[in-house]
Image (cartoon, grey):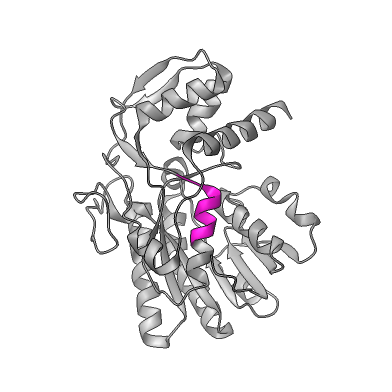
């Protein structure tokens, strides 16, 4: 990864899962970090250790509120826009807020980055590919998205945000990049956010049946959060504009994932099949050639290590 150092960074959505890991990595490398989060889906608990460190500041604010941006102190040389509900349970509960943060929130973040002369990175998603007809998914693939389906508030919010970043760069020359993050897992995920890894782990630790959607044959390619953070910061430190896929290389079915988690936890839980959500993608795996060639990035944390660390964190959280 590049050794480029940042003096001051702003992370929107920094109290969330990936955002809090970004804040920790940046603060640990000597960057002064301002984290802005409205705590709609993020948690102040993710920042407990960070708030003891010099150079870190948490501000409760909404990325869609112009007043919140005007109140931010000083200038930044890096803006990471990660504010957005990211799990189906959250964006289905907050559909208008999800659309607002992808549109108004992204516009305000871009304006601040441009005014400060900062590098800007948009956290986009593999969901822009929808239920893909191309496999694996390359950055040049336009996707197969249902614009009025239940997942559209998230998919289209991110697609619009990508268009906004591209237009802002074209009109104003904003130093910006787009990262398309595929399914990421690791410590600090919420058990009730509806995503497979935390749901399966919580169920296994509780001895409850693991609820696998459909027949469990749908696939994902998961990346451990440390690898995702590496990829985001490598893109930030580069001159690339993206979009660039960042995601895991090992494709796995949801049924196999559930079985692996049962085995690692030593749980006696059984598998219970439930209805599959509408527009749930059948297959998902990134083509990460661009990240390898342009950023020198590739996943380093294997399935066994990543799941053991994640399960360990969940076990300690339950016991605390």
Q: Residue at x 40, y 81 (%)?
A: 169
Q: Position of residue 120 (x, y in %)?
A: 50, 73
Residue nearest the viewer, comparing 65 with 201 = 201
| 170 is higher (above) or lower (below) than 297 | below
- Residue at the limit of the structure toward the bottom, as seen here: 172
Numbered-mark total = 0
Q: Is residue 64 visible?
A: no
- The answer to whether residue 78 is above or below residue 93 is below
Q: Is residue 288 left or right of residue 312?
A: left
Quarter of the image that includes the C terminus: top right
Who's the residue at 51% across and 82% down the image?
Answer: 114
* Residue interval drawn in magenta: 223-231
Residue 112 in view of the camera: yes
Q: Is residue 313 magenta?
A: no
Residue 214, quarter of picture: top left
Q: Is residue 228 magenta?
A: yes
Percent coordinates x, y for residue 174 in the rendering: 45, 82
- Position in image of residue 163 (x %, y %): 33, 71
Relative side of 180 to 74, left or right: left
Nearest to the observer: residue 15 or residue 108: 15
């Amino acid at each position: 990864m590049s050794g480029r150092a940042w003096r001051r960074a702003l992370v929107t959505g920094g109290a969330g899962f990936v955002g809090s890991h970004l804040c920790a990595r940046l603060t640990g490398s000597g960057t002064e970090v301002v984290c802005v989060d409205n705590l709609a889906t993020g948690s102040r608990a993710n920042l407990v250790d960070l708030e003891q460190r010099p150079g870190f500041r948490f501000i409760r604010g909404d990325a869609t509120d112009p007043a919140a941006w005007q109140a931010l102190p000083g200038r930044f040389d890096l803006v990471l826009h990660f504010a957005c509900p990211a799990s189906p349970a959250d964006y289905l509960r907050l559909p208008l807020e999800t659309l607002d943060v992808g549109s108004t929130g992204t516009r305000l973040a871009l304006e601040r980055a441009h005014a400060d002369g900062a590098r800007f990175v948009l956290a986009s998603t593999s969901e822009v590919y929808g239920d893909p007809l191309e496999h694996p998914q390359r950055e040049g693939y336009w996707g197969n998205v249902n614009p009025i389906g239940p997942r559209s508030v998230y998919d289209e919010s991110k697609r619009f945000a990508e268009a906004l970043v591209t237009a802002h760069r074209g009109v104003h020359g904003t130093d910006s990049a787009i990262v398309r993050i595929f399914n990421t897992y690791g410590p600090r995920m919420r058990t009730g956010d509806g995503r497979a890894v935390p749901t399966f782990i919580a169920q296994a630790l509780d001895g409850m049946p693991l609820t696998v959607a459909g027949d469990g044959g749908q696939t994902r390619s998961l990346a451990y959060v440390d690898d995702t953070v590496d990829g985001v910061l490598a893109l930030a430190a580069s001159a690339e504009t993206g979009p660039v896929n960042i995601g895991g290389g090992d494709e796995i079915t949801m049924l196999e994932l559930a079985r692996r988690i049962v085995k690692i936890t030593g749980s006696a839980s059984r598998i219970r099949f439930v209805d599959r959500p509408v527009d749930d993608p059948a297959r998902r795996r990134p083509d990460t050639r661009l990240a390898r060639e342009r950023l020198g990035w590739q996943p380093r944390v294997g399935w066994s290590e990543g799941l053991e660390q994640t399960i360990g964190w969940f076990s300690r959280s339950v016991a605390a």
